[in-house]
Image (cartoon, rainbow, N blue to C red):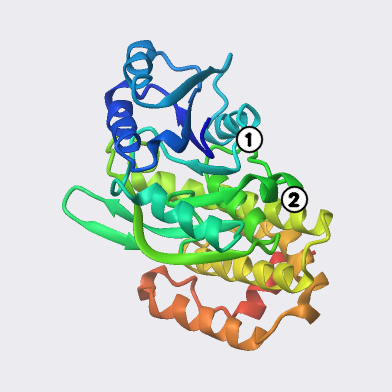
Amino acid sequence: MGIIDIIIPTYNAQKTLERTLFSISYQTISDQLNVYIVNDKSDDDYTDIINFFSMFLNIKEIKLEKNVGPGLAREEGIKNSNSKYIMFIDSDDMFASPKSIEIIYKEIEKNDLDVVIGKFVECRENDFIHHDNDEIWLHGKIYRREFIEQNNIHFNSSRANEDNYFNQCVMLSDPRKKYIDYPIYFWMYNENSITRKNDFEYSYKGLFGYISNMNEALLFAVKNNKNKVNIGNFSLAVLCAIYYYYIEYNDQEFLKCSKSIKRIYLDHREYINNEENIKKTQYDFAISNLTPENINGSTLTFDEFLESIGD
């Protein structure tokens, strides 16, 4: 048995899953991996693919009785595996090189860390975008299972921003972490994915998913008595992001969704360092990055935005 579980939530991915599994099978430590295909009630049959790769990998399919979305599918993968470390990859993505897993594994093992965060490359049709020091996506990260279990960290049922929720619960739990300057993961362009189809509509609606998930992450931190400085700083950072969205979209729903986050922020305000500088920086960023016609009718300050949220 391996020491790293690779969990792949899979829904109607027959066209891309082979590419993903090839990128795992050519890893230099492929013999140390356990691969879990979590079949999220797909219409596709993966039997032939799994039978082929079973010649090279310790691979298992977990079939779900109903479609639950990628977050809860990953959660099933965690529940049905038991190795020391956990990694995630989507069924249309790839590891960046044959040494990707070996490099990130050596970092977490030799330094006794809880999470290691590698670089990932967003591979678009005509462009490559490099993501460094990312704490949002699951891409290019390895987690110590014991840390996840001891801190009672789980995926929620959200179908958008669920990876951000999971990662923020990790970060709010004060992990021993390290960022490495090595590309671990290729996030492959897929025009049919939910994040690509009708990109503006998804991005706009996804903002409400972001707010909901960040609220849940903060409630998780409060409930589990996490570090108050972390909670204060994170609640302010989330409110600053919502402030930017509000200026851009002028949508009153953002205010309604933000009440719980505001309460947590006010309860932890005394623990925040450099609060005024953070708010001013965010305000300057918002105004400088929006065209005049998109600014919410006035130069609304952050404090005025907070007042608009209400109690």
Q: Amino acid at mark 1?
A: Ser
Closest to the observer, 23 or 10: 23
Q: Is residue 126 left or right of residue 247?
A: left
> What residue did someone put label 2 on?
151
What residue is at 56 percent from the left and 85 percent from the top? 280
Q: Is residue 287 left or right of residue 17?
A: right
175 vs 74: above or below: below
Residue 157, disc: 1
What residue is at 63 percent from the left and 40 percent from the top? 155
What residue is at 61 percent from the left and 57 percent from the top? 114
Q: Amino acid at mark 2?
A: Asn
Viewport quadrant of the C terminus: bottom right
What residue is at 82 percent from the left and 70 percent from the top? 267
18 vs 139: above or below: above
Closest to the observer, 280 or 37: 37
Q: Disc 1 vs disc 2: which is toward the camera?
A: 2
SS class, disc 1: loop
